Amino acid sequence: MTNRVFPPGFTFGVATSSYQIEGAHDEGGRGPSIWDVFCRQPGKVIRGENGDVACDHYHRWPEDIGLLRALNVSAYRFSIAWPRILPTGFETQPNAAGLDWYDRFVDALLAAGITPWATLYHWDLPQPLQEMGGWPDRRIVDHFVRYADIVSKRLGDRVGHWITHNEPWCAAILGYQSGEHAPGHQDWPEALAAAHHILLSHGRAVPVIRANSPGAKVGITLNLTPGYPASGSAADRDATRHFDGFFNRWFLDPCYGRPYPADMVADYQRLGRLPTGEIPFEKPGDIEAMGAETDFLGINYYSRAILRSDTLPEADNAPRLIPEPPPVARTDMGWEIYPEGLRDLLLRVSRDYPVKDLVITENGAAWPEGPDAEGRVRDDRRRAYLHAHLGACLDAIASGAPLSGYFGWSLMDNFEWAYGYDKRFGLVHVDYETQRRTLKDSALWYAEVARAGALLGIAG
Ligand code: FCB
C-alpha cells in the first residue's frame, strides 16, 4: 500500500474562473465577452442562462475568501477577465477599475495566507476581438501578449504563479469546431488555426510574464484525457491513437517544442481538416516559440475515454474488453468516474515529455445535492470521488510522477458553460436565489485533508 501522506509542501487548492463566478457583467467598466454574446443566442445555453450575476463573486469576494480559509487551502486558482482589463481588447490604456479589482483581491488573498494562482485566459475573450476574427486570426497573438504584459506588470510583484491558458482544446475545438462553446462556430480549419494561435500566444507570453514577475512560476493548463481501446483489435487501437492525437498530443507536443504529430497531420489532411502540403497557419519559428520553457504543466482531469472503432462494423470487431460504464459509474455530467486514469495519465506525461513539475489544476465532479432540513449538504459521492482521485495522485507520486499540487474544481457551484447552473461542481453549495453559500460535506472533509497533508478516510 502506498504512503497516504502527501510530500511536504504539496499544494492543496481549489479553482474557479472569472465568467463562471464573478457576475457584475456590466460593472467596473467591463466590456462584453464572447460568452455574454453566446449566452444571448437562443438554444446555446440551457434555459438561456448566463453569467450576468453568477455567484456575484465580484461583490461577495470577502466572504469567498472566508470560504477559502475554511477550506484550509494554501492556494487559490482564479482567472482574470480580459474584458475587465481591456473592455474592447483594443484600448491603449487598461481599464483602471478592472486592474484595481484584481489588485485588491490578490492583496486580500495574500493577507489570508493564500497563494494566488492566476489564469490569464479562461475563455472570456473580449467580443470585439472575436469580431476582428478571434483566435483563428493570427493578430490575436499580439493582443493576448499585450494583455498578459499589462496584467503581469501590475500583479507580478505579488502573483508568483501564472497560467497562460486554460484548456486550449476546449477553447479551440468546442468554440470553433463543435460550436458548443462561445463563439459557437463549426469549422475545422478555424478550430485548428485557433488552437495554433492559442498555443503561440502562450509561448510568446511566457518570457513577458517572467520579465514582469521575477521568480514566478509560469505554465499552461491542458485538459488531458487518457484513451483506452475497448478491445485489443487493430481498429480500436487505431481509434485510440487518433483520439490521443486529437485530444492530448496535438497540444502537448508543441508545448514541448515538438512539431505537430505527423500521424495527426496525415489524419487531418485525409479528413479534409487541413490542406495537403504545408500547415497553412504555421510560420517559421512558431514551434520554437510555442515550446517556450515552462515551470510546470497544469493538468485538468475529469475522466477517461474508451475508444471503439466507428469504421469497423461492430460484428466484425473483437469483443469488448472494457464495457461501456453504467450510469452509476458516472457523474451528473455523464462522465465515467475513473481515478486510475489520473494515475496513468500522470505517469504517461512524465514519461513522454520533459516535465519538471505537474500540478492538477482541476479535478472534481458534478452532482446535484443541496442542503437538507438541517442545512447540511451530504455529498458522499463527491467526497468519494475526491478521495479516489487524491489517492490516484499519491499512487502516481509513489511511482515517480513529479506532482506538486492539486486544485479541486470548484470552490463553489457556478455557471457551468452550456449547462448553465444545472451542474453543481462546488465543494461549497450556492443557493442562486439568495447567494447563500454552504460548505458541503466534501468541503469539510477536504479541509481536513489539506490541514493534515494526508489522505484521510471517508467513513462516516
Ligand atoms: C473544465 C473547465 C472548467 C469547468 C470544468 C467542469 O473543462 O476548465 O471551467 O467547466 O471543466
Image (spheres, rainbow, N blue to C red):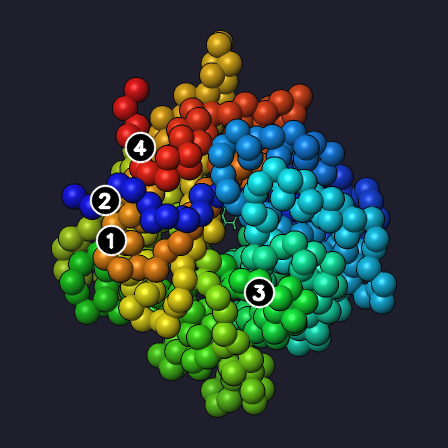
- Mark earlier in primary sequence (3, 4): 3
In the rendered image, the quadrant that contains the C terminus is: top left
Residue located beneath label 4 in the image: 456
The percent position of residue 398, horizontal first and vertical second, equals: 24, 53
Q: How far apart are marks 1 and 4 (CA)?
A: 17 Å
- Mark earlier in primary sequence (3, 1): 3
Q: Is mark 3 within 8 Å of ligand 1?
A: no
Point 34% across, 65% down: residue: 349
On residue 3, the disc is 2
In this orientation, does residue 423 appear? no
In this image, 406 relative to 217: left or right?
A: left
Q: How far apart are marks 2 and 4 (CA)?
A: 12 Å
Three-letter amino acid code of the residue under disc 3: Gly
Label 3 crowd (10 A; few <14 / some 14-19 / many >=20): few
- Mark earlier in primary sequence (2, 4): 2
The percent position of residue 397, horizontal first and vertical second, equals: 29, 54
- Mark earlier in primary sequence (1, 2): 2
Residue located beneath label 3 in the image: 215
Classify mark 2: helix, strand or loop.
loop
